[in-house]
Image (cartoon, rainbow, N blue to C red):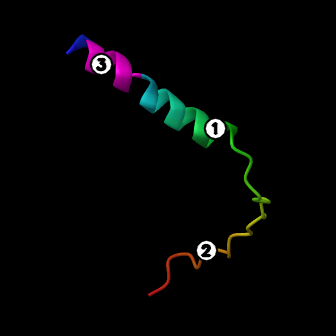
C-alpha cells in the first residue's frame, strides 16, 4: 500500500505544475458590461 501511495503521490503535483507552468497563448480581452435595464416590466 505504501509503495502505491509513493508512486501515485506525485501525480497531482505534476498535474498542478503542468497547469500553472505551461505557457498558453491567451491574451486577455476587456469586456464592457451593457448598462442594466433597471426595474422595467
Q: Quadrant of the C terminus?
A: bottom left
**Residue at far left of view:** 1
Asked if marks 3 and 1 touch (Cβ < 8 Å), the reply is: no
Q: How many C-alpha atoms fall within 10 Å of the one at disc 3: few (<14), some, or many (≥20)?
A: few
Asked if marks 3 and 2 touch (Cβ < 8 Å), the reply is: no
Residue 5 percent across, percent down from the top left: 30, 19
Residue named by callout 1: 20
Answer with the quarter of the image where residue 28 lies. bottom right
Give the answer, above or below, for where 29 lies relative to 24. Answer: below
Q: Quadrant of the N terminus?
A: top left
Using residue 17 as the reference point, say whether residue 29 is left or right of it: right
Which is nearer the eye, 21 or 27? Answer: 21
Give the answer, above or below, for where 32 lies relative to 10. Answer: below
The secondary structure type at the circle numbered 3 is helix
Sequence-earlier tag: 3 or 1: 3
Using residue 40 as the reference point, say whether residue 28 is left or right of it: right
**Residue at far top of view:** 2
Residue named by callout 2: 36
Residue named by callout 3: 5
Using residue 13 as the reference point, say whether residue 31 is left or right of it: right
Amino acid at each position: 500500500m505504501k509503495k502505491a501511495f509513493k508512486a501515485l503521490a506525485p501525480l497531482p503535483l505534476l498535474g498542478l505544475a503542468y497547469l500553472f507552468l505551461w505557457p498558453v497563448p491567451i491574451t486577455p480581452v476587456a469586456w464592457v458590461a451593457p448598462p442594466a435595464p433597471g426595474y422595467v416590466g
